Structures are given as C-alpha cells and as structure tokens.
Amino acid sequence: MEELLGIGEVAEDVGWIDEGEDGLGCLLEGEGDGQADESLWDEDPDLPDDAGMPQKPDDFGRRMIAGEPVEEGPIIQKAEASCALDIEQEVLKHLGFDVDSTALENLAVQQGWYDPEEGTLSENVGMILEAHGVEVERRWDWTLTELLDALESGEEVIVALDAEEVRNPQRGPGGAPLEKIDQGHAVWVASIDLDDNGNISLVLKDPGNPKGSDLNANVSDFLNAWADFGNFAVVTRNSGANDTSGLSAADSAGKEEI
C-alpha cells in the first residue's frame, strides 16, 4: 500500500503549520500491517496498568537509560514534505559528514527516494545514509527493547510514526492513548529515559514540531503513534566505524557509485 497520508505547510519560524484533521504528514505509507508487535519488549508480556507496557527485570532502571542528547541545534523542516530528508541530513552531520542540503535533495530526487510534493516512502528512509556508506537495518516490527539496545550501542535510530499522537496526544477513559487521524512523519530517536518516579519517555528530534525540534514523548503515546506505521524503524549499524574525516557528500555518494 502506497497511500499519501497528507502534507502540512511550512512556517518560516517553526517549519510546520498544523492545518487540522486532514491527515497531514510527510511520509507515504508503505507496506506493513500497521499493528504493534504483540510483545512491546522481548520478554515479560504482562502489561502493568500504569505504564501500558511490559515490566522489565531487575536491571530495568539501568537499561532504561539509553542514547544521549544530540548536540546539533534545532532541526527545521525545510519543506512541507521533507521530514525524512532533513533528518537524514542531520544524522549524517552528527556522524561527521560534510553535507550540502541541496546536493542531498538532488540525489534523493534523482534516485526516486524523495518526492518534493509528496514526501518519502517509509521503505526509502535511510537510502541517503546508505549512499554515504552508512550501513543501516530497515524493517517493520521492531520492539522497544531493540531500539533500546541500538541506542546503548551508539547507533542512530529513525522511526516512522503518527506525528499528531506524540505532539498532541489525547487519552481516553483509564488513560489509554486515543487514535487520531494518521499524520505520517519521521523522527530521530535521541534517547529513552527513566525518571525518578519510574516514568519512561523518549526524546525525539522532530523537525516539524511547532514547539521546537526536541520533543519529549511519553512511552505509551510513542508506542501508540509508532504502531500506526507497523513499528517501522531504520537503525544504523556500526555507525561509529565510519571514517568520514574530510569526506564531502559528493565524495561519499560517488564512492558508492549511486
């Protein structure tokens, strides 16, 4: 299924204007069943009432601190459908690449990975990274434990989700997250955190967020939004092994013979 979920409108100061319930977004929906994994973690499937996710073993507190703050400044969505493109550019910069946004967009358009009018198919997210020699794993049905392990290993994580359900979540009776009209979007997961009260949250780099690109999302809201896109993620592999010193976007793309 390759259904356009909708397009937002760029604001000069924040990069996004929410136009209401018309299914805004910058990702096209690809394959996938749109269902969350039966076990959000890899073990302990019993769901506590207050957290909406499985209990963890005794090392829970230790394992729930994963990832680290991303030092790059705010990520501004440059066009109404460019969220995935903009995030991949920032990930490349974070990994040490000298990148030019115009060159990256031209590459993505020429290769058919990005349509300036419609956005990016989920399965094309990460293609720009691969063109620069960054190995990625791209698939549906990831678990939160797998994202946690990737962050602990120093990898970069990009996910597809429903933007509205993490930016403006709503809860029903009993506190369960409510479904909203899908707004396909890509975000960069910076960290998974556990506070002193046992509340789990994810820090997301969201280029289209009117309140700023650093978004702190409750884990239940994140899982609800992520499930709408089949728990799709693109995770780098051995990203720390990439030697990018002095390598420009054009050099690296040419090296890969794209």
Image (cartoon, helix red, strand yellow):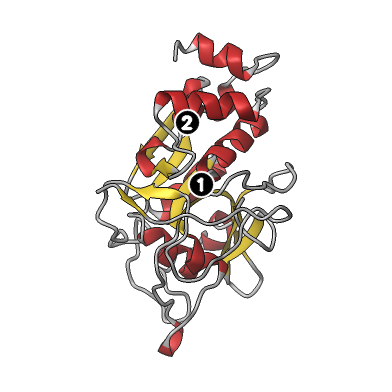
- Secondary structure type for disc 2: loop
Look at the image and tell me whether residue 219 can be seen.
no
Q: Give the image location of residue 129, x and y in percent.
A: 51, 28
Left or right of 71? Residue 146 is left
Q: Is residue 30 above or below residue 219?
A: above
- Asked if labels 2 and 1 touch by Cβ distance under 8 angstroms, the answer is no
Q: What residue type is labelled 2?
A: Arg
Identify the residue at image location x=39%, y=36%: 124
Q: Give the image location of residue 74, x and y in percent.
A: 72, 48
Name the foreground residue: 182 vs 130. 182
Name the foreground residue: 224 vs 109. 109
Residue assigned mark 2: 237
Query: Mark 1 vs mark 2: which is more N-terminal?
Result: 1
Residue assigned mark 1: 81
Q: Give the image location of residue 82, x and y in percent.
A: 54, 43
Instruction: Please give the label number shown on residue 210.
Output: none
Q: Is residue 57 above or below residue 68?
A: below
Q: What residue type is labelled 1?
A: Ala
Where, quadrant-wise, is the C terminus in this rendering?
A: top left
Give the alpha-carbon distance from disc 1 to disc 2, as whole Å: 27 Å
Identify the residue at image location x=36%, y=61%: 228
* Tally of numbered tags: 2
Q: Give the image location of residue 184, x and y in percent.
A: 43, 55
